[in-house]
Structures are given as structure tokens and as C-alpha cells.
Amino acid sequence: MALSFSQYFKAIRNSSYTQSVARATTLTTNETTTLNTIASSTETATATSMLNPSLNYLSNCRVRFATTLIASTLFLFLCELIYGFENKLSA
């Protein structure tokens, strides 16, 4: 059975509409996947960048503490040397 001219164009329009909807659904799925990937990597990067200053601060605190401890020990040792040397001179 042959299709009439209007039936033929109606079938093409319906087919085109169906393909457009399928294409749009595929795009939406791909966009959602892409956006989720971007969001997750952005969240990871943000969490990492928020954590790094804390780690750097803690590392700096350890370095400062160690430096202060060494400096104060050397200072006390130097004071003991000077004080002990003065006592030996005065005795």
C-alpha cells in the first residue's frame, strides 16, 4: 500500500521528532555525566586546597617548635658556659 504525500511527510516528521528527542536525551545524559565529573573533581580540588594550608600550617608549627627548642637549648647551654666560666674566674 503506497503512502500518500501527507502521510509520507507526517511519518518523516514523527521520525525526525523521535530522533530529536533521542538525541536530546543522549545529550542530557552526557551533560549530566560531564557535570557530575566536573563537580566531583572540583569538590576534590577544593577539599584538597582547603586541607593543604592546614597541613602546611601544622608542618610550619613543627618546624617552628623544633627550631625554638634547638635555639633555646643552645641559648641555655651558652648561658651555662658563660655563667660557669664566670664562677671559675671568681673562685
Image: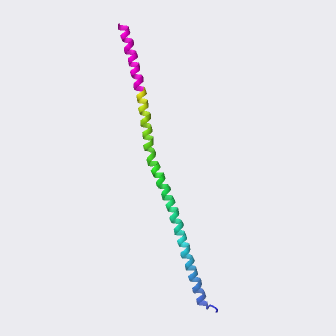
Placement of 46 over or under 84, stated as above or below: below
Residue at screen point 40% across, 22% down: 75
> Relative to residue 46, is residue 3 drawn left or right?
right
Location of the C terminus (image quadrant): top left
Q: Quadrant of the N terminus?
A: bottom right
Above or below for 1 versus 56? below
User: Measured from the top left, where is residue 22 in percent x and y?
Assistant: 55, 74
Picture residue at 52% right of the left edge, 65% below the top: 31
Magenta stretch containing residue 83, yes or no? yes
Q: Position of residue 19 (x, y in %)?
A: 57, 77
Q: Residue at x 54, y 69 (%)?
A: 27
Q: Could you tell me residue 7's position as x and y percent?
A: 59, 89
Residue 11 shown in magenta: no
User: Farthest top residue?
Assistant: 91
Q: Quadrant of residue 56?
A: top left
| Residue 30 image point, x, y percent | 54, 66
**Identity of the residue furthest to the right in this view:** 2
Q: Main secondary structure of the magenta part?
A: helix
Horizontal side, residue 49 vs residue 15: left or right: left
The correct choice, above or below, for 7 with respect to 64 in the image is below
On the rendered structure, is 18 left or right of 72?
Answer: right
Count of numbered circles on the image: 0
Range of residues picked out in magenta: 71-91
Task: Give the residue displayed 44% in from the left and 47% down from the top.
Answer: 51
Coloring scheme of the render?
rainbow
